[in-house]
Amino acid sequence: MGLVSRQPLLEDSRQDARATNQVSDSRPDSRATKYAIGIQIKHLSFCYPGSNKSTVENINLTIQPGEMIALVGENGAGKTTLAKLLCRLYDPTSGTIAWNGKDLRSLPIAEVRSRIAVVMQDYARFPTTVRENVGFGNLIYLSDDTAINQAISEAGISAKVKSLSQGLETPLGKQLEGGVDLSGGQWQRIAIARALMRLSTAEVLIFDEPTAALDPKTEHEIYSIFRQIAAGKTTIVISHRLGLAKIADRIAVMENGQIAEIGTHDELMELNEIYGSMFTRQASSYI
């Protein structure tokens, strides 16, 4: 893998995994994928209205078709802002995000949203039935039991749903009469099932801190689900929990709104700078 270093002429091989704002990767995608899509981020900056400081600044990054890339860093590094720009919840202050060479701003919003499936940290817990909690992911399948049950099965929550007295029609949430509450991990799986409802049309998956509130055992189970559903999709994982980053093809370390390092887990551990320090610190908390 050819990584652009901070100073390409330096002979120190560790610099290969150290990136500046000018990050790119010309590595050809070695995996076959039917999705002819790539994301090209060029000189991207964003400043929230009323602020004089950019949250992300001069980011350059290419995400290959079918690649899973993890964006990691401390809180406030700009990870979630970058994810929202990729969803076109915001438009850049400067620079561009392109899909297959087309500026995201030139595409109809409805088309952009139809091509993205998102699981966020603060996912919704709708006070309504299991069917609607899952079917809201793609309304045209709201009455399709087969599609909803398949999504529920792939999210690993089918046993729980089958145990409920009214199955798909069970109301969720204690504020409803006869409503059933779920554990944090079970609500997380419902949110994943909702995202899976649009998997057939989604070309880009975004997971934003999806396991932040889960215990380690449940977190590991969710990792396995993510890896399975991400196969063949262009996937962006935002996390400060680095166990999830390990399953990615590449890791981009964000610091102060910029990409400071990029490479595989092994490359960044060998580099032993920002990512290596973060990973070692987190790993020690499990010992």
Image (cartoon, grey):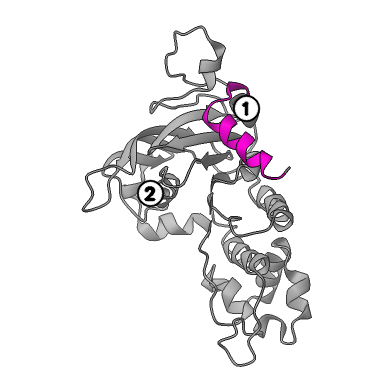
Quadrant, the C terminus: top right
For label 1, the residue is 269
Is any part of residue 247 visible from this angle? no
Name the residue at 42% across, 57% down.
111
Query: Is 282 one of the magenta-colored residues?
Result: yes
Name the residue at 65% across, 51% down.
226
**x and y, in percent, of residue 150 in the image:** 71, 66
For label 2, the residue is 85
> In the depicted view, which residue is nearer to us: 198 or 14?
14
**x and y, in percent, of residue 112 in the image:** 42, 54
Task: Answer left or right for 230 relative to 257.
Answer: right
- As measured in the structure, the alpha-carbon distance from the residue carrying label 1 to the one carrying label 2 is 29 Å
> In the depicted view, which residue is nearer to us: 153 or 202?
153
Task: Answer left or right for 160 relative to 36.
Answer: right
Name the residue at 58% across, 55% down.
212
For badge 1, the amino acid type reads: Met
Dot 2 surroundings within 10 Å: few (below 14), some, or many (20 or more)? some
> In the depicted view, which residue is nearer to us: 282 or 90?
282
- The numbered dot on residue 109 is none
Task: Answer left or right for 23 relative to 160.
Answer: left
Magenta stretch: give its range. 270-286
Quadrant, the N terminus: top right
Q: Main SS type for the magenta part?
A: helix
Q: Is residue 97 above or below residue 268?
A: below
For badge 2, the amino acid type reads: Leu
Kind of element beneath mark 1: helix
Residue 89: quarter of image: bottom left
* Number of marks drawn: 2
